[in-house]
Amino acid sequence: MSSYLSPSSPHSNLPKLLNKLSKETSPYLLQHAHNPVHWQAWSPDIFTLSQQHNKPILLSIGYAACHWCHVMERESFEQQEVGDYMNAHFINVKVDREERPDVDHIYMDALQAMTGSGGWPLNIFLLPDGKPFFGGTYFPPIKMPQRASWMEVLKGVKEAFENNLEKLQEQANQLTQHIVNTNIVASKIQTNTSITNDSSGVEAMNEVIASKDEVALMAQRILQSADTQWGGFGNAPKFPQTFCLQMLLRNYAMHKDEASMVHAIRSIDKMIQGGIYDHIGGGFSRYSTDAQWQAPHFEKMLYDNALLLGVLAEAYQITKKEIYRKVIDDTVVFLQRELYNGEGAYYAALDADSEGVEGKFYTWSYDEIEKIIPDELFTSFCKYYQVRPEGNWEHTNILWTQESLEIGFSENFVEAKNILLAQRSLRIRPALDHKIILSWNNLMITAFCKCYAALGKEEYKNRAIENMNWVELNFIDDTATHLFHTNTNGIKKTFAFLDDYASLIKAYLDLQEITGDLSYLHKAKKWTEYVLENFIDEQDTFFYYTPQYQTDIIVRKKETYDGAQPSGNSMMCWNLNALGTIFLNTTWTAQAEKMMQMMRKMLLQYPSSFAFWGQSFASMAMGKKELVGVGPKSSVLRKEVLAPFLPFKWVILTPQEDATILSTKGRYSIDNQYYICYNNTCLPPVSQLSDILALI
């Protein structure tokens, strides 16, 4: 990927290198390098230029796989007349939200405060000091009902900046203060509370941080929005919401609640049946545009597939459904084929579009399939996958089914899908976003660890180790003091953010469990100390998204919401609790408990929005049990103890004891003896798997 444009980019035949973006590494920014707009990347220089020329800043944020970003580019940013006007009256700045999520977070908050909604492309206008005063998402070239045209917006902003600057400054100050206020965690520390049966379900508690009954309450509230016909939550558009599914699985593990289990499995099955899952090539698209999971938004993101692999692995641990093993294997094959860099890491995403059409690479006409599928399979294949002569979506066909999942993985259908995959490989491919993002690769490492635990497949352990080795070699700075957020074509950019460090620490924890290599725990401890030094807030409780030495943004934000990915703070709560227990660092466990106390009210009231926090909450409610084995035979039962779904355990099986990890001290055995430790106390050793599982 030496060229800044993918060979299949819709702009690959257009003039290149016409603006400052041509020197960038982000595929999204490079897609705009040919625009007549004088785009430049985010830097402190943009504020200086804005002040010198007395022009507002137009900040346009998107990402390479964003369909509507491409649409707005074709309709507006590629037009000479539009570019001339933007150049004359604005300092024009393009940001890849995946390269600078900190910038995106700040100005998306401002947009949502202004309009009540958000999305990409995010087009927002700033004063020379970086404060926002007006914005929106997609603007069409011609005025539409309740949506101004792009040129109307530009002219209106220009006029307001020239003639009503004082009012804009007032609005900008208010918006900036709103962004600052979002740093205040909404809940207060909850003490002396207990559960009651009132309408809120939450009253004060007897100094209990988390209880099993509250986990059940959270699951009940998550299920209130469950779609009991099609799985998932709510109506269209429908996202996988993996953390909510994992909370339901944990409630099932804790309470044997059938409703939680049934809906989690229903949701997973419906996604696999749907068009959001690529039945031909494996892997999942980002979300479904309908409630039935039929028509996806066709972009494929690394983080979505990593998180879904984790859910599938847990579902397999509970059900042992062979179909989940097959989907895991096929999704990994997709990742290796489409997103693997050949050296150990994974690229960010595949575009939704090819040849300027969303989904064209993935959809089929009835006639195409008829020509290449053997006659004896054609009728049954089309019936199973809902393929029709007139099409099942926008005059073409998305493969999806409402029948048994096992049929789709039968030998005959696998043969037919392989024929279609070979034919599809001849098409013009969607563009590849070849950024390598630290946090997303960390999520992938955790996914491989979960898949190894569930399936016991050595390939997955080896891929987790290989991925971590690449991360360690390619994201650290030359002085080995900090990490970077992206690596594109070997160029490291942007100081790493909180979720980069937090997900790395968690990946180390997960790797230790499947390998017994205690060096991973010491690396996790090292980076935790770094985060505490460089990201902690003034109350020594939560963490800022950006390190204290990063200075090119107007506000340091604290993110607590678990969206499409877990928040850095929720992961750090998990990490502090785990490492505090492992290293007997009561300061760290106390901080994790304080974070949970601060979040508790919000978590119980809105569990769907804080569902990764919920996993730490469930662990604190249940109490973590450590399985410790030290000695040459310690790993004999590793696969057996990892295989069941036991989410409230930590596993340390290692050849040698480590004096700094107290649970290993004095546990060395030449035989295969194992200790179950709980609340810093270990039970007498056992050696039989049945005894181990019974005690856990």
Image (tube, rainbow, N blue to C red):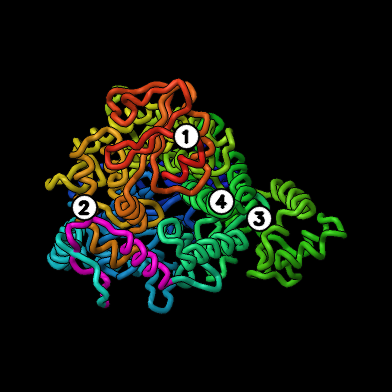
In which image quadrant can residue 13 be found? Answer: top right
Span shown in magenta: 199-225
Residue at image point 19% right, 63% down: 205
Task: Give how far apart the Cα atoms at labels 3 and 1 are.
Answer: 30 Å
Find residue 305 and report its horizontal and vertical position in percent.
51, 49
Q: Which residue is mark 4?
A: 316
In this view, the mark in front (2 or 4): 4
In this view, the mark in front (4 or 3): 4
- The three-letter code of the residue at mark 2 reads Gly
Work out whether 519 lies above or below 590: above
Q: Which residue is mark 2?
A: 130
Q: Which residue is mark 1?
A: 514
Q: Which residue is mark 3?
A: 279
Density class for disc 2 (Cα within 10 Å; few <14, some 14-19, many ≥20) is many
Work out whether 95 lies above or below 166: above
- The three-letter code of the residue at mark 1 reads Ile
Examine the structure image and report whether residue 574 is included in the region drawn in magenta: no
Find residue 131 and report its horizontal and vertical position in percent.
20, 56
Q: How many marks?
A: 4
